[in-house]
């Protein structure tokens, strides 16, 4: 024992020399990879910003800018004040749809999740199985029948066509059920003995304790609704009802290829709220994905 | 004996009351259970279950939205086999899904491992923001921007390529390059999302395992091979399923970037279903095609679950 210890000790300072050099090299490669990827991911965004501030006539000019060289903020004004296209209206439409869908989902998913996790009644597990298996159904499969349904209840070209189908999600129900299952049962039992009804237990005791799951679901629902493209393409017909994503794509066709600076200014306007939100709430977004990702 | 009998007799009244109380409690619980689940169940039934059932009926119909549906038997299903475009479009979709899923997961995993290293908090924040940013932004707007960037003649990417002495590439106009562009765009847009999923998985691995391994003399590669990869396998399994199902349903990406062209080179299955339904107004056939996608995705997910027993380690 003693000899083996002694032979190994003097080797320690000299032996790791070569691996250390390799490690340094590896470290360098990792950093080149990370910074390179970060640049690749971010460069197009900074190009949008720089080009949206160029004079419209120069917006096609090369070399490209990745940092603003001129500051034509009037491009943004032109987009916002454009007489044909009511850009603030698109903003409001997107916000309204995303907020209503998010609120509805938070409510329906947390109520159903509470019911599945905390209450016992006949048929509960069968119903939960239906919810779970509907997770497997891709949205594409129901695209055609849903369109026929929406059309038959006269909701074409209405924002309700986008809000109503988004009022619940099997994923959200599953997520909230798991969160409620994680709460100690003594908590709700005690409240029950004290005479609280189920609504109060849900609303005042259980709901405040599943904050992370709620914020995760809220963030995802909002982003999905805000970025939804297929829905507006299918259901919305008139300019006044358009949401941001479809309006921007249509704006490109409408203003033609002659006014790239304006189109990019419009893209920037749609990015700003998300950027601001992410900078402030990065922790929540990433934890949200962590919460949901790990449940899989 | 007598004391027991008298005890039970005297308590029978209160037992009955207790039972009654218990009974109303139970009724209340059942009632509350149904009420709480009602809004979600109603919404799920109207906007998910009913449409799925309707899709199975629609397969046997000819319906152009304007005139009433007409029963056509197996016509739509036969058309599936006769449609040569469908074959090409599925082949496009398979290539897109395979490459996008592969690169998204590979890059996502590498980025997560990179970002998970110990580094200055501000650097980590900047890296995460830059890498995750495209995920948050509307895909349609970004596809529009990439359309500008990838233009052959005055596009930014080709300009940069020429600066370093390379030939300009017909990114969107050549049918072989267009698919490359679509995959590149998807990987650019989505690998940050997978990074965050893998990051969550990495952070859930207890630090103590690595410490124990270091004490036992495991080197970096051994720690990766015997700790990180096995413990990350449930995350990888989840990430693979999510990204595969997502990639199979890509729509706005190709709609804006290439419009499915040139010819059918980048037409993916969802764009095709959309066109059958809303350009050709063949709702029945569109439903038939979407059911094939449904069956394929279900089959793939089950296959992944089965395969997962070989490589996913749950502790």
Image: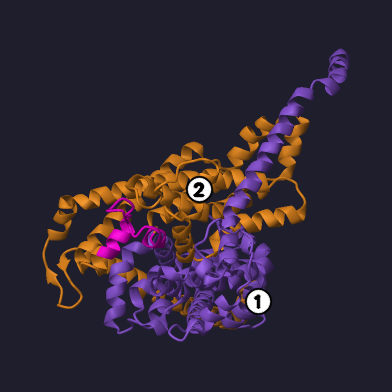
Q: What color is chain B drawn in? A: orange
Residue that mark 2 sits on: B104
* Quadrant assignment, res A54: bottom right
Would residue A8 be seen by someone viewing this image from the given angle?
A: yes
Identify the element where label 1 is drawn. helix
Identify the element where label 2 is drawn. helix
Measured as percent of width and height from the top left, residue B246 is found at 43, 56
Tell me if A152 is positioned left or right of A266 in this view.
left
Residues at discs 2 and 1 in contact (Cβ within 8 Å): no
Q: Which chain is purple?
A: A
Measured as percent of width and height from the top left, residue A203 is found at 61, 80
Between B246 and B257, the residue placed more toward the observer is B257
Q: The magenta stretch spans which residues?
A: B251-275
- Tell me the crowding category of disc 1: few under 14, some 14 to 19, or many 20 or more residues within 10 angstroms, Cα based: some
Residue that mark 1 sits on: A205
Residue at image location 50% in from the left, 48% down from the top: B104
Q: From mark 2 to mark 1, how far is it between C-alphas?
A: 41 Å
Residue at image location 74% in from the left, 33% down from the top: A24
Q: Residue furthest top?
A: A3
Please identify the quadrant where the N terminus of chain B is shown: bottom right
Q: Nearer the viewer, mark 2 or mark 1?
A: 2
Q: Is residue B221 above or below residue B261?
A: above
Between A281 and A68, the residue placed more toward the observer is A68
């Amino acid at each position: 024992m003693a000899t083996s210890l002694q032979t190994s000790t003097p080797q320690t300072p000299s032996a790791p020399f070569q691996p250390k050099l390799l490690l340094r090299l590896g470290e360098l490669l990792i950093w080149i990879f990370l910074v390179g990827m970060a640049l690749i991911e971010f460069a197009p965004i900074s190009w949008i910003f720089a080009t949206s501030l160029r004079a419209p006539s120069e917006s096609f000019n090369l070399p490209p800018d990745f940092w603003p060289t001129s500051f034509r903020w009037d491009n943004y004004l032109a987009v916002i004040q454009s007489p044909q296209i009511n850009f603030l209206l698109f903003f409001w439409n997107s916000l309204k749809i995303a907020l209503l869908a998010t609120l509805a989902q938070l409510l329906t998913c947390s109520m159903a999740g509470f019911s599945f996790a905390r209450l016992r009644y006949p048929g509960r597990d069968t119903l939960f199985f239906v919810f779970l298996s509907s997770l497997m159904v891709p949205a594409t499969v129901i695209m055609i029948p849903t369109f026929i349904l929406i059309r038959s209840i006269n909701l074409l070209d209405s924002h309700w066509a986008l809000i109503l189908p988004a009022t619940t999600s099997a994923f959200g129900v599953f997520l909230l059920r798991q969160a409620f299952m994680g709460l100690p049962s003594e908590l709700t039992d005690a409240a029950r003995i004290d005479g609280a009804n189920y609504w109060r237990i849900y609303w005042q005791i259980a709901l405040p304790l599943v904050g992370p799951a709620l914020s995760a679901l809220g963030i995802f629902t909002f982003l999905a609704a805000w970025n939804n493209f297929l829905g507006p393409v299918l259901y919305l017909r008139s300019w006044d009802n358009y949401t941001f994503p479809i309006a921007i794509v249509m704006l490109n066709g409408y203003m033609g290829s002659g006014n790239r600076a304006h189109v990019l200014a419009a893209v920037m306007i749609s990015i700003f709220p998300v950027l601001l939100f992410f900078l402030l709430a990065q922790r929540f977004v990433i934890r949200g994905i962590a919460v949901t990702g790990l449940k899989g | 004996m007598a004391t027991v009998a008298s005890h039970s007799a005297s308590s029978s009244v209160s037992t009955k009351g207790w039972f009654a109380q218990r009974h109303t409690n139970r009724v209340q619980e059942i009632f509350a259970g149904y009420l709480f689940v009602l809004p979600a169940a109603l919404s799920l039934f109207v906007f998910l279950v009913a449409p799925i059932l309707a899709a199975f009926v629609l397969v046997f119909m000819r319906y152009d939205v304007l005139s009433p549906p007409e029963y056509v038997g197996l016509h739509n299903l036969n058309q599936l086999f006769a449609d040569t475009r469908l074959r090409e479009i599925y082949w496009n979709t398979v290539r897109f899904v395979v490459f996008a899923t592969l690169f998204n997961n590979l890059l996502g995993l590498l980025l997560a491992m990179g970002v998970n290293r110990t580094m200055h908090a501000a650097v980590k924040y900047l890296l995460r923001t830059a890498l995750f940013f495209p995920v948050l932004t509307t895909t349609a707007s970004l596809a529009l921007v990439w359309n500008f960037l990838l233009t052959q003649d005055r596009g930014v990417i080709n300009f940069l390529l020429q600066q370093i002495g390379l030939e300009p590439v017909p990114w969107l106009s050549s049918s072989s390059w267009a698919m490359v562009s679509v995959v590149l765009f998807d990987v650019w847009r989505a690998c940050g999302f997978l990074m965050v999923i893998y990051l969550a998985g990495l952070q859930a691995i207890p630090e103590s395992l690595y410490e124990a391994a270091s004490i036992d003399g495991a080197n970096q590669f051994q720690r990766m091979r015997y700790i990180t990869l096995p413990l990350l396998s449930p995350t990888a399994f989840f990430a693979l399923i999510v990204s595969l199902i997502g990639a199979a349903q890509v729509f706005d990406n190709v709609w804006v970037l290439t419009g499915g062209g040139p010819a059918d080179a980048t037409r993916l299955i969802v764009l095709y279903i959309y066109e059958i339904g809303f350009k050709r107004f063949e709702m029945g056939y569109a439903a038939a095609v979407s059911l094939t996608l449904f069956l394929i995705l279900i089959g793939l997910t089950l296959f992944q679950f089965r395969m997962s027993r070989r490589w996913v380690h749950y502790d």
